[in-house]
Image: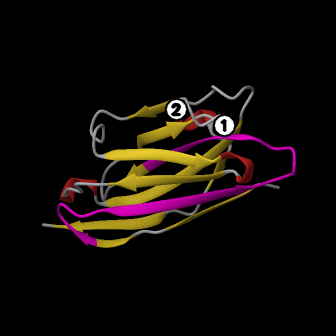
C-alpha cells in the first residue's frame, strides 16, 4: 500500500508564488521517482516536472522552465514544487505521482509510468 498526499495549493495573484508538497509513503525500503502533473478545466492532464530518487535528475515541461523548481527530501520520499512568476494559465488541479525507482537517476514525464497518484490540490492564479 502506497499513499501519495499533496498539500499547498491555493489562490494567488499573477506573478506570485506557491509551494506544493507531496509525500509518498510505502514500506521502509521503498524509494520513489516522483512527478507533478496538472489538469486545467476542460483540458487533458499534462506533465509539469519530475525528479529522480537521488534528487539530481530533474526534468521540466517547457511551459514552466525557469519559473518552477522541483526538489526533494529523499529519505522521506517528500517532493516539493516551487512555483514562481505564476500565470493564469498555470491554474488547475496539480497531481503528485510516484513510482518505485530502479536507480537514483530514474525519472519519467509519462503518466503511464507512474503507479501511485495523489488526489490533487487546486491552484488558482488570478489575473
Q: Position of residue 97 (x, y in %)?
A: 59, 48
Distance in Å between CA atoms under marks 1 and 2: 16 Å
Please indicate whether residue 55 sits to the left or right of residue 47 in the image: right
Q: Is residue 63 visible?
A: yes
Name which quarter of the figure residue 103 lies in.
Answer: top right
Q: Which residues are magenta?
A: 12-37
Q: Residue at x 31, y 59 (%)?
A: 41
Extreme residue toward the bottom, this view? 11
Which quarter shows the N terminus? bottom right
**8 in magenta:** no
Please indicate whether residue 80 sits to the left or right of residue 5 in the image: left
Q: Position of residue 53 (x, y in %)?
A: 66, 37
The correct choice, above or below, for 58 with respect to 17 in the image is above
SS at badge 2: loop
Q: Residue at x 59, y 37 (%)?
A: 55
Our reading of the magenta stretch's main secondary structure is strand
Residue nearer the viewer, 24 or 73: 73
Q: Indicate which disc, 1 or 2, sits on the residue closer to the N terminus.
A: 1
How many discs appear? Answer: 2
Q: Position of residue 101 (x, y in %)?
A: 72, 33
**How many C-alpha atoms fall within 10 Å of the one at disc 2: few (<14), some, or many (≥20)?**
few
The label shown at residue 122 is none
The correct choice, above or below, for 112 with respect to 40 in the image is above
| Residue at image mark 1 | 53
| Residue at image mark 2 | 110
Extreme residue toward the right, this view? 28
The correct choice, above or below, for 22 with respect to 50 in the image is below
Q: Residue at x 34, y 54 (%)?
A: 83
The correct choice, above or below, for 90 with respect to 64 in the image is below
Please indicate whether residue 81 sits to the left or right of residue 85 in the image: right
Tag in front: 1 or 2: 1
Amino acid at each position: 500500500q502506497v499513499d501519495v498526499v499533496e498539500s499547498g495549493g491555493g489562490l494567488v495573484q499573477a506573478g506570485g508564488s506557491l509551494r506544493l508538497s507531496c509525500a509518498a509513503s510505502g514500506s521502509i525500503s521503498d524509494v520513489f521517482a516522483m512527478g507533478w502533473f496538472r489538469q486545467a478545466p476542460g483540458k487533458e492532464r499534462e506533465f509539469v516536472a519530475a525528479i529522480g530518487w537521488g534528487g539530481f535528475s530533474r526534468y521540466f515541461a517547457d511551459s514552466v522552465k525557469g519559473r518552477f523548481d522541483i526538489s526533494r527530501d529523499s529519505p522521506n520520499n517528500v517532493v516539493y514544487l516551487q512555483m514562481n512568476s505564476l500565470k493564469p494559465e498555470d491554474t488547475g488541479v496539480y497531481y503528485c505521482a510516484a513510482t518505485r525507482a530502479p536507480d537514483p537517476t530514474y525519472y519519467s514525464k509519462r503518466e503511464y509510468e507512474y503507479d501511485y497518484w495523489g488526489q490533487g490540490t487546486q491552484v488558482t492564479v488570478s489575473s
